[in-house]
Each structure stands twice: as structure tokens, then as C-alpha cells.
Image (cartoon, helix red, strand yellow):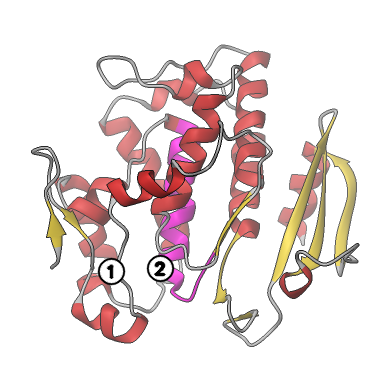
Amino acid sequence: MASKITNGAAPEQLIKSKKRVRDLAEVYTRSDEVNAMLNLIPGKVSIEQTFLEPACGNGNFLIEILRRKLQADAATHAYFEPDKKGRVAQFPKRGKAEDVALLAIRAVASIYGFDICPNNIAETQARLYAYVMYGEDLLLPGFITGSDLHTQAYIEAVTPEHALPLATDYEACLFRFADQMARLRKTHERSDAISPLLRDMLKLVLARNFQQGDFLAKQDSAGQPLTVGKWTFLSGKVRLEDFLLADVGADQPKPVSGLPLRTLTEFVKGARNA
């Protein structure tokens, strides 16, 4: 596999397999290149700033964008900026933890990613979930560097030889694995104050904002038009409106579907029953 060693760190593997390069033209972007490109953005990024990655792979750009958003905001900085030992602070107890988590969800809600490979989308979702919950890109070592034996063993068991077909429960497996890795690394206590409601809300945003599809053709894997969800968070309530991807950037695009402003509880419950 193509790789590069930077500053004595484990080598970054830029491909998963020759088959994936042949079938998908898939070659990952090195972390130093990701950072160099994002450094071209003037000023600091904000929580609400919108980013869209048309071929996101398994999230190398998107995880760094989320990191920059949360480390730049005064309300979330302390919980996502590592200390000298590489650890991040635990969320505060009770209500304030919910405030921090909701800000992190809003940061994710203005990030969008598309990729033709379903495995990549599932891995992107799991990486962003793990970063919000535990302040760590728990899946990065196994997916990119192969330096974490726990992660590597799990990925090889779930997707032998990095096969292209998406396992029926691959996405759910990866979320569970992120939680398991947090317990192994003893970082799980950080998110104990976060309610199951906000965890579910985060997963809903991830499911909606990161989709398998052909960005150039503006179609999903079933040949249907791709859509982009616009999230509105207001006084503890949330609303989702869907727009055609083809209309993004047009003057006054009309939503093709939408959910009214609801409390978080009503919104999550409605999504479960949909």
C-alpha cells in the first residue's frame, strides 16, 4: 500500500486495496495535505459555517473541519482541545453538558459529505460521532495508519479485505465499536453526562448529512435525486428542510420536504417512528 511516514509517526496508508483504487479511483488525502488546504481558509471557522465535501472518502477533511470548528468556539474549546497529555476535558455535569453537546451537533449539522462507497460514508459518520462524544478520532488509526491493533482487528473481522459491499449493520457496528474503544481507552466517562436523546439526535444528523451517492450525477445509489438537509436549531427545538442538491446555490430554492419546528424529544421520537 502507498504510505508516508511523517515525523516518526506510523505510516499513513493512502489506499485500502488495489481493487478499491481500480473500482473507485480511491486514494486518501494525507493529513498534512488536508491541513495545508484547510489553512487556506481565512480566519477561524465558526460553528455554523457550512462545508460540503463531494467525495469525502471516510472523512479525512470532515473530521479536521469539525475539529477546527469546535476548538475555535469559546463555548466548546475546552472540551475538544487536547492538553499536554493528549486528553480532552470531560463534559460538565447536568444541563451544561447538554449545551456543549448541542453546540457540537450544530457544528456537525452544517457539514455535508457524499461518496459513492457506502463503507466510506459509514466510517465518516462513526468518526464524527466518536469525536463529538469522546473528543478522539477513535477510528483513525485502524482505517488510515493501521497502528491500532484493536481497531485493525475489528475492521478486518467486519469487512474482510475491505470488501466494497456494505454489511447490513456496518454503520451500527461502527457506532458500537466507537463506544467500545472509548471504554478501552478509558475516555467514555467524558460523555456520561450526555443524554441518550442527544446521542440519537447526533446520529440522525449524521445519517441525513452524509450520504452514499454520485455527486456529479446528483443521484443516490437508487438513481433518485440527492437532497441536502437544512437544520434549524432554535430555543431547544429543531427543524429539518430538504432541498435538491441540484438547487444548492440557486436563488431562493424551494424545499422538497420538511419537518416543522419541534422539540428535540418530539423530533427524535418522530424519526424513530418514521
| Residue drawn at the location 28% of the way across and 78% of the way down | 20
Could you say which is closer to the camera, residue 182 or residue 82? Answer: 82
> Within the magenta stretch, is there residue 59?
no
Residue at image mark 2: 119
Find numbered disc 2 in the image and state the secondary structure of the residue it sits on: helix
The reply to whether dot 1 and dot 2 touch (C-beta < 8 Å) is: yes
Mark 1 packing: few (<14 Cα in 10 Å), some, or many (20+)? some
Q: Where residue 182 is drawn, which disc sits there?
A: none
Magenta highlight range: 114-133
Residue 201 place in picture, x, y as percent: 66, 43
Left or right: 1, with 47 as reference point: left
- Quarter of the C terminus within the rendering: bottom right
Residue 108 location, quadrant: top right
255 shown above or below 72: below
Left or right: 223, with 82 as reference point: right
> Within the magenta stretch, is there residue 130?
yes
| Residue drawn at the location 40% of the way across and 56% of the way down | 173
- Quarter of the N terminus within the rendering: bottom left
Left or right: 271, with 70 as reference point: right
Mark 2 packing: few (<14 Cα in 10 Å), some, or many (20+)? many
Residue at image mark 1: 159
| Residue drawn at the location 69% of the way across and 38% of the way down | 48
Task: Point out the frontmost of discs 1 and 2.
Answer: 2
Residue 75 place in picture, x, y as percent: 61, 18
Please, what is the three-letter code of the amino acid marked with disc 1? Thr
